[in-house]
């Protein structure tokens, strides 16, 4: 092992965590440590300082995360240069067994690790500890035969009695578990403790009393209502259609004496839709309406109008008239422009590529230099560097694929063009800027506004240590 040791002094809460893990050596553990508080530093300290003779496998959820983790462990604090190896798609299969034999600390993706275990489980035998990064990603949001994403159900069996340490920014969401025809909404922590048995848990609350609060970057959430009477009118009709279709589903369940399946919970109708013993046309209509409403809130008008050609919609919407009445530029994009001109660096998150394109075009037309990152961006790191370091670049637009694993504290404000109901996912999006102002766009007078308000309340309830809601003030917030 290299003699280069870290001169960095751990923060108080980091020392507390490291001491707890040291005291619990050999006991499975789940650690909740919020974004920006140093999970990678904890990882480095464990493998390089606290347990310098223990053979570790660090499992990360994606190839991009693997590359960043390897680079961090090699360069940031030192001490691992001769010990570190990786198992990923960029390592030829013929060299992987050699890496496992010669290196003490291995960074691997679960798919590659499971493939090695299937061929030769003995190669994993010398490794005593498995550190799982972003352990919450093991859990399926909606699960059927298994609650774990592939290949974790098999991989955890391969890992057997090894010391498992799971780390996550949050352990506070729930997910849906199906058992035969029943549905259970379960805390993800309960499921993790089932699959990583006899686990001790360290939560954010356990860190109170240390210096953790000195290092939390507060995130301020505010709703920026977007007024568009035409969108509001479309939304009202779609809301009524969704509600009427849901009532039809529940009536059909009642007629067949199956109403108990959903237990009177509207959320269960959506989650169990494919399993419900109701007419397939009814299922398809309900699913289509929910998706259409999402498109209306999240896409430019000309794009979402393409989805309005189902037969059951012809009685309620005249697509030709809507096409003439609706503007080409989304009112949300206009609001993004209003925000961006008042800030030096604006980060914009949107779910669809057409919105990425329209935001970019509108900002560029207004004279604001803008960059984009999507799943198709080949040089994501270079684009991100340009946004961070070039003072002339005023905005960065991200798609959901493009935004993964990014930290962008240089942004003055984040604008979220559309939201989903999963509070954990949205919270992780909000933390990309490591604190500061987050504006959530929502069409006024619509069900989207109600959804966003509910989301904000759930985030406040689950993550009280670093989030607060502030009332809109167009002068103060720049909206």
Image (spheres, grey):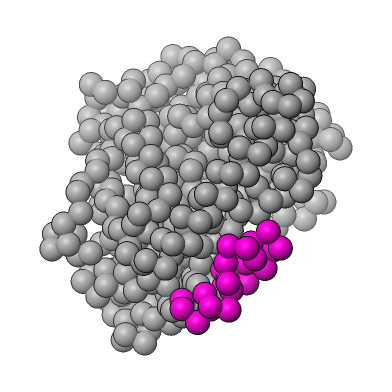
Could you tell me which quadrant the C terminus lies in? bottom left
Inspect the magenta stretch and tell me whether residue 436 lies in it: no
Left or right of 286? Residue 115 is: right
Horizontal and vertical percent position of residue 229: 37, 66
Name the image quarter holding residue 125: top right
Chief secondary structure of the magenta span?
helix
Q: Nearer the viewer, residue 94 or 368?
A: 368
Q: Which residues are magenta?
A: 303-326
Inspect the magenta stretch and tell me whether residue 313 lies in it: yes
> Is residue 426 placed above or below 177 in the rendered structure?
below
Name the image quarter holding residue 188: top right
> Is residue 80 placed above or below 51 in the rendered structure?
below
Left or right of 460? Residue 47 is: right
Horizontal and vertical percent position of residue 32: 43, 29
Q: Nearer the viewer, residue 308 or 415?
A: 308
Q: Nearer the viewer, residue 5 or 167?
A: 167
Residue furthest out toward the right:
119
Left or right of 54? Residue 42 is: left
Name the image quarter holding residue 127: top right
Left or right of 333? Residue 339 is: left
Residue furthest out toward the left:
475
Horizontal and vertical percent position of residue 412: 25, 62
Q: Residue at the spot x=33%, y=63% of the render?
A: 226
> Is residue 43 placed above or below 30 in the rendered structure?
below
């Amino acid at each position: 092992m290299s003699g280069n040791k870290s001169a960095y002094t751990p923060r108080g809460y980091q020392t507390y965590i490291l001491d707890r893990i040291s005291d619990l050596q050999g006991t499975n553990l789940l650690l909740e440590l919020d974004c920006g508080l140093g999970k990678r530093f904890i990882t480095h300290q464990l493998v390089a300082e606290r347990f310098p003779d223990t053979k570790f496998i660090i499992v990360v959820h994606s190839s991009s995360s693997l590359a960043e983790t390897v680079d961090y462990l090699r360069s940031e604090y030192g001490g691992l240069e001769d010990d570190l190896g990786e198992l990923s798609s960029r390592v030829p299969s013929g060299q992987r067994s050699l890496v496992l034999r010669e290196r003490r600390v291995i960074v691997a993706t679960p798919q590659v690790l499971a493939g090695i275990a299937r061929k030769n489980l003995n190669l994993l035998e010398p490794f005593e500890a498995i550190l799982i990064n972003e352990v919450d990603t093991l859990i399926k949001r909606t699960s059927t035969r298994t609650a774990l994403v592939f290949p974790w159900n098999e991989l955890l069996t391969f890992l057997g009695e090894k010391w498992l340490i799971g780390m996550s920014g949050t352990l506070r969401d729930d997910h849906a578990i199906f058992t035969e025809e029943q549905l259970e909404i379960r805390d993800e922590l309960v499921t993790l403790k089932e699959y990583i048995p006899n686990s001790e848990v360290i939560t954010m609350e356990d860190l109170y009393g240390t210096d953790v609060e000195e290092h939390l970057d507060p995130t301020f959430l505010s709703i920026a209502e977007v007024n568009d009477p035409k969108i509001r009118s479309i939304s009202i009709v779609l809301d009524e259609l969704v509600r009427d279709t849901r009532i039809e589903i529940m009536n059909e369940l009642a007629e067949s004496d199956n109403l108990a399946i959903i237990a009177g919970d509207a959320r269960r109708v959506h989650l169990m839709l494919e399993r419900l013993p109701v007419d397939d046309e009814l299922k398809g209509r309900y699913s289509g309406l929910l998706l259409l409403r999402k498109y209306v809130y999240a896409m430019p008008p000309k794009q979402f109008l393409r989805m309005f050609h189902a037969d059951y919609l012809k009685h309620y919407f005249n697509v030709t008239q809507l096409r003439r009445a609706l503007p080409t530029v989304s009112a949300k994009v206009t609001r993004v422009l209003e925000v961006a001109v008042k800030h030096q660096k604006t980060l914009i998150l949107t779910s669809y590529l057409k919105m990425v394109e329209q935001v970019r075009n509108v900002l560029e037309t207004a004279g604001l230099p803008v960059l984009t990152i999507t799943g198709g961006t080949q040089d994501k790191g270079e684009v991100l560097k340009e946004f961070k370091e070039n003072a002339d670049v005023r905005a960065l637009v991200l798609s959901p694929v493009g935004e993964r694993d990014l930290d962008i504290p240089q942004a003055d404000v984040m604008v979220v063009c559309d939201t989903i109901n999963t509070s954990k996912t949205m919270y992780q999006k909000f933390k990309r800027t490591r604190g500061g102002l987050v504006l959530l766009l929502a069409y006024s007078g619509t069900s989207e506004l109600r959804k966003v308000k509910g989301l904000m309340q759930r985030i406040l309830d689950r993550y009280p240590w670093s989030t607060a809601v502030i009332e809109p003030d167009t002068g103060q917030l720049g909206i």
